[in-house]
Amino acid sequence: MSTHTDPQNPLPSAKPTILELAARLSLSKGAVSRILNDKGEGFSEETRRRVFSVAQEIGYVPNPLARALATGRSGFIALWVQTLVTSYHAQVAHAMEEALETHGYQIAVTPFGRFETRREKYAGTPAGVDGMIAHEIYGDILPLLFRGVNRKVPVVTTGIFAPMNGYDHVYVDLSGAAEDAVRHLVRSGRRRIAYASDDIHSRSQDTRFLAYHAVMAESGLEPELIGLPGSDRASIRSALRDTIGEQGCPEALFCHNDDAAIAAYRALCDLKLRVPDDCALVGCDGIPDTEYLPVPITTIVQPYAEMCETACRLLERRLADPDADLQQVTLPALLEIRESSLASPQQNRHLP
């Protein structure tokens, strides 16, 4: 069976099969299957390299169903993430896809946002996945993960929330970087420093919120909270424009996330206010967008790649040994200072 495209006929022929691959290699189908599925311990490294080289040459792609039957594994990992609309969550999904690919897995993404209004419509985790990674999952959503799953699969949780009992967890600690961010604004000479977030009255246990209040208290400064209408940049921009127009502009804004910081940047521009001279800006998450504005935004950078790679390692460990002790890995976020929060010439004159 030929798998090459005829120049006179651009339509490709049928996909090559494992039988064709075995014939080209002068090996049995079973031998090729064992090597492709990492069960060919009795074969030389040269033979293994030749199998993968010829497979790539003829464009052979293993049938996932056949592989699942042969190995008991599908090669798919489910990622549960709140949404794919925000840049932050899309960044997490992208980093997780790359990490899983490095470990030989494919990703199946399920956004769980707005679950309260769509709870009964969730089909649950895709059938046949080998494991699940749940990013910043809420406790009452967890049962939804297992809807439609007829066997127990290992779960690793990730993100800034505290770990839940019974699960391996990769915790991203924002507290140190958040304290550094507020102290940086205080040292720059700013005194009216506001904290802007959606769901502002439910943030009392959020590490950013706690860090903001702790540093403001130690600096003898009065906290100022600005409630935002959600995560949509356009609505945040409009709301901040109205709030600043009515209450005056704070000297600095510490935003709950980077989407809010980018929206704040646009609101300040709408009001003909300058960043950082009239108002300093700090965001959180470290999404790439923050670096590509006329005035790059200072942000707390989350270690996406390291978090996802660590989650993959914990999941592989759990797959290999379901009874292994639970593990929690803590990764610190880091403050990256950029132009949006530097001291202006006027503020420099008042610095000690």
Image (cartoon, rainbow, N blue to C red):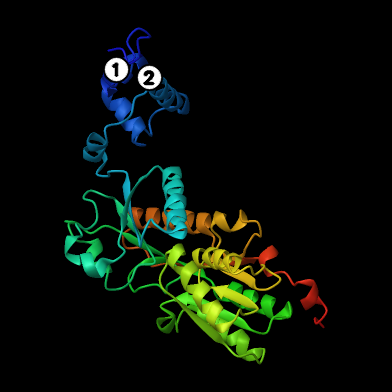
Seen in the picture, residue 123 relative to 12 is either above or below; the reply is below
The residue singled out by tag 1 in the image is 20
Residue at 24% x, 40% y: name it: 68
x and y, in percent, of residue 183 in the image: 67, 79
**Residue 16 falls in which quadrant of the image?**
top left
Residue extending furthest top? 8
SS class, disc 1: helix
Mark 2 in CB contact with mark 1 (< 8 angstroms): yes
Residue at 32% x, 20% y: name it: 21
Q: Which mark is residue 143?
A: none
SS class, disc 2: helix
121, 266: nearer the viewer: 266
x and y, in percent, of residue 92 in the image: 45, 56
Of the numbered discs 2 and 1, the one sitting upstream in the chain is 1
Left or right of 349? Residue 149 is left
Seen in the picture, residue 248 relative to 319 is either above or below; the reply is below
**Residue 82 falls in which quadrant of the image?**
bottom left
Seen in the picture, residue 288 relative to 198 is either above or below; the reply is above
